[in-house]
Amino acid sequence: MTGATIRRSLVICAVAIGLAFVAVPASAQTGQVKGKVVDKENKPVEGAAISIENQDGAGQKLTTKTNKKGEYIQIGLTPGKYRITATKGDLSQTQNIQIHLDMAELNFTLAPGGGGQMSKEDQQKATARLAAVRAKFDEAVALSNSGKDDEAIAKFQEITVDVPKCAECFANIGTIYARKKDYENSEKAYKQAIEVKPDFAEAYNGLATVYNAQKKFDQAAEAGAQAAKLAGGGSGAEAKAKFEEAVKLDPNLADAHYWLGMSLVNEGKLPEAKPHFEEYLKLAPTGQYAEQAKGVIAAIK
């Protein structure tokens, strides 16, 4: 998570993290969903529109269609809660699902009066509501990037009233408080993000930064290790080995230097970690982890 620039969506975050794992396929860092759409006679429905919307604040919105067998599949989904709708003609069905780092399956039956059916009017209301949330989110991002931190925090908090499980909102609040060096409220916000979304690697990463800034290295190591694991690097030695390999293959991979530095911090090897954070800042002075890297360097000194 960046301190200088608040993230606009989980999609951006997922792509940025992926740069650090050159040895890991992108699909290994995201989830997938597949399923089948049938009619009331259990016959496949070809050409049904599948709408996939992330419900964690300002998330993804993707669309696809079923094939001749009524089947659909969508990859590259950021883990989180989704609302998926199947529509054909005047019939539609909506279901909610939690996407993890594996393949999920969700099937639909399109029939008059079918369970989960959503009217066109309800669909329009849901779309309008999501658009309003996104507009507020973008406004909060703009406020933060303009240095209006208190106003940005208030706007993100306003969103959480309507969307109590907006993990992205809580994480961004944590980032702003950390930038203000209000570590108590920053820690609280990051923990709220984790409570809402336990597999949120960026929130753990932010928490590690807060602990490092306070020289709470044991807690920082624990949070950092969890962040690396959730980000796709495995745990402990596995994560470190992947980051070392990434740096060896391409010394200009800024994110790989950052995560290798975090792995070394987790092992208590602070002098060895420092050069990697410095290299990160050299390669990406305004990168998504710039504030965290500066904080760790300051803490090591």
Image (spheres, rainbow, N blue to C red):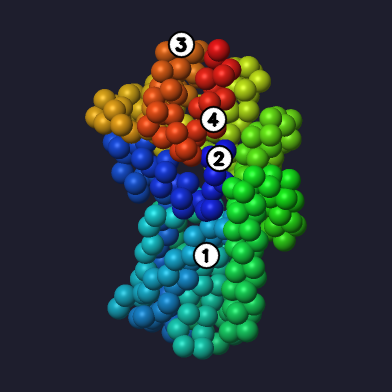
Which mark, residue 271?
Answer: 3
2 or 4: mark nearer the eye: 2
Q: Considering only order in the chain, which callout, 3 or 1, is on the residue closer to the N terminus?
A: 1
Taking 244 as reference, is 180 left or right? right
Q: Secondary structure at mark 1?
A: strand
Q: Which residue occupies 62% across, 39% down?
A: 175
Which residue in the rendered view is the most extreme toward the front? 146
Crowding at mark 1 (Cα within 10 Å: few <14, some 14-19, many 20+): many
Q: Secondary structure at mark 4?
A: helix
Pointers 1 and 2 in contact (CB under 8 A)? no
Specify the amino acid type for callout 1: Glu
Name the residue carrying label 4. 292
Q: CA distance from mark 1 to mark 2?
A: 28 Å
Q: Decide which of 266, 97 is in the foreground and name it.
A: 266
Picture coordinates of residue 289 (x, y %)? 49, 35
Name the residue carrying label 2. 4
Work out whether residue 253 can be spotted. yes
Q: CA distance from mark 1 to mark 4?
A: 31 Å
Picture coordinates of residue 63 (x, y %)? 42, 70
1 or 4: mark nearer the eye: 4
Name the residue carrying label 1. 53
Q: Considering only order in the chain, which callout, 4 or 2, is on the residue closer to the N terminus?
A: 2
Q: Secondary structure at mark 3?
A: helix
Crowding at mark 3 (Cα within 10 Å: few <14, some 14-19, many 20+): some
Specify the amino acid type for callout 4: Gln
Taking 38 as reference, is 175 left or right? right
Q: CA distance from mark 2 to mark 4?
A: 10 Å
Q: Which residue occupies 63% across, 84% down?
A: 121
1 or 2: mark nearer the eye: 2
In the rendered view, would you say 1 is above or below 104? above
